[in-house]
Image: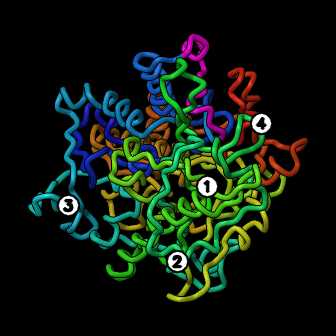
Amino acid sequence: MEPLTAARLGQKVVLTEETWWLGGQLTTQAVPPDEHQWAEAFGPTRTYRQLKEGVRDYYRRYYPLTNTARSAPDLRLGASLVTRVAVEPLVWLAVIEAMLAPYRAAGRITVQYNLKPVAIETDGDVIRGVTLRDGETGDTHTFTAPYILDATETGELLPLGNVEYVIGAEAKADTGEPHAFEKAQPRVQQSITHVMALSHVDGEDHTIARPADYDRYHHRFKWPNERYIFPDPESGWFSLWKFRRVFYTGHFEPGFMGADITFWNSMNDYHEGPIIDVPEDEIAENLRGARQLSFSLLYWRQTEAPRLDGGIGYPGLRLRPDVTETNDGLAIRPYIRESRRIKAEYTVLEHHVSAEVRENHGPEMWADSVGTGRYSVDVHMSSPATKGGEPVMQRSRVAGYGRPRVWPFQIPLGALLPQRVENLLPACKNLGVTNITNGCYRLHPVEWNIGESLGALVAYCLEHDVTPRQVRHTQERLEEYQRLLARQGIETSWPDLQAGGSYNQRVNNRPHWTWGETDGDALFPGSGCDDVGAE
């Protein structure tokens, strides 16, 4: 959250957003946070933890919680399996807006909506201004600033500013990574997913119209154990229905709401084609295809899926457009897992973080660390290398069945600095990582940490009249900047921890499951959550 940190440190910030909501995974993409098991205590920044506590307080203040839920200090909102705090996007949005409100009132943060970047003015290695187009009026607006932070989901400013970058899969000769491709393949980009908000009520029929592309996709919809994917009683089974559940009726007074709400982004990964650096008509077709895939999955589940009771279909599944604030119940924007990535002063590689590659040597330690993260190398099936070709199952390439373990890692400042351009910085997943290590640096707490650290970096550089590169390469400056991060509640190192496991290990080899937080019933009696994993 770079605007908040920079504003707290006395700077003025203009924040632009392409939609009508302040965007990101939590809000416009409707993806509850993926977190490591220590996230409540350490790792994520203080402000990130304040966001989560703010959400809990919002529920205590405004929602009719049961007495048990209201008094729980670590209330597990949503009784979700992926995180301790999973809620509707509107609640994340409300709390984020509340955190920004004092600085907007003070004139330190200005927010402008419905603006998309369309051009950048450069002067050698310096960005002079960014021009954005209003999606409603078509008018253009040019903003100038000493520093530009690119927090777009696809690194949109990089090609506009002629900033050197990479997209797709690198060649092994370029990175030396054990699981890289032999040849670079820019079109091999991780799948996108259009998340659905769903409820389920037995006895009701909310069957949607048969999607236009249903025949194209329905053969993909199967699962080895139906208990994983369908609405079921609180049985204690691992369930994808509970995995990203954002509204658990058991937390609220009886009769307040008749059904749980869950966000669904499993079995609907779209890997038919990429959406970055391809022709506009191809982008439009792939975005349309991602929506059709999600609708097709829902229709299959409503009409053809085998039921646990021996029947066919769950017509009681219902889209919830009131939750996503869209017309159809899909998120405002698709969940985008991979971005353009800067060619950085320093690039994080597979052999810096993978416990499989590094064995017992622990993670790479960086003197210029500006934060921490913890997530598996989660590289989803990718788009075809050539149009009409076969999709690449990257999980098989990278890790066999399951995901490779990753040591708790750091975020090196060198990965946030472009090789050439001085004042455009990557504020989310567009940092200096590879197609492989993007798989562990692309999650909510890490992206939030990156933004905060850059907000503090810009404030430090403006106050001391130095450049980010000078900060990294001057020991005294670097240490002073890292002390500033510490005062802001940004941790730059980990305690001595072990590498985590995978969901596959959690399900199939429970005695050796090393990635659970704690027992859900101990946290919240009757929640139905057993050991919780977060990758």
Q: Give the range drawn in magenta.
A: 66-81
Q: In this orientation, which residue lies closer to the viewer: 196 or 187?
A: 196
Q: Which of marks 1 and 3 is nearer the N terminus?
A: 3
Q: Distance between the residues labelled 1 and 3?
A: 30 Å
Instruction: Tell me, for residue 208, which label it has, or none.
Output: none
Residue identified by numbered label 4 = 236
Instruction: Tell me, for residue 440, which label it has, or none.
Output: 1
Mark 4 touches mark 2? (CB < 8 Å): no
Instruction: Tell me, for residue 130, which label it has, or none.
Output: 3
Residue 234: image quadrant is: top right
Mark 3 touches mark 4? (CB < 8 Å): no
**Front position among marks 4 and 1:** 4
- Image position of 356 (left or right of 432): right
Q: What is the three-letter code of the residue carrying label 4?
A: Gly
Q: In this orientation, which residue lies closer to the viewer: 266 or 463?
A: 266
**Front position among marks 4 and 2:** 4
Q: In this view, does 15 lie above or below 256?
A: below
Mark 2 touches mark 1? (CB < 8 Å): no
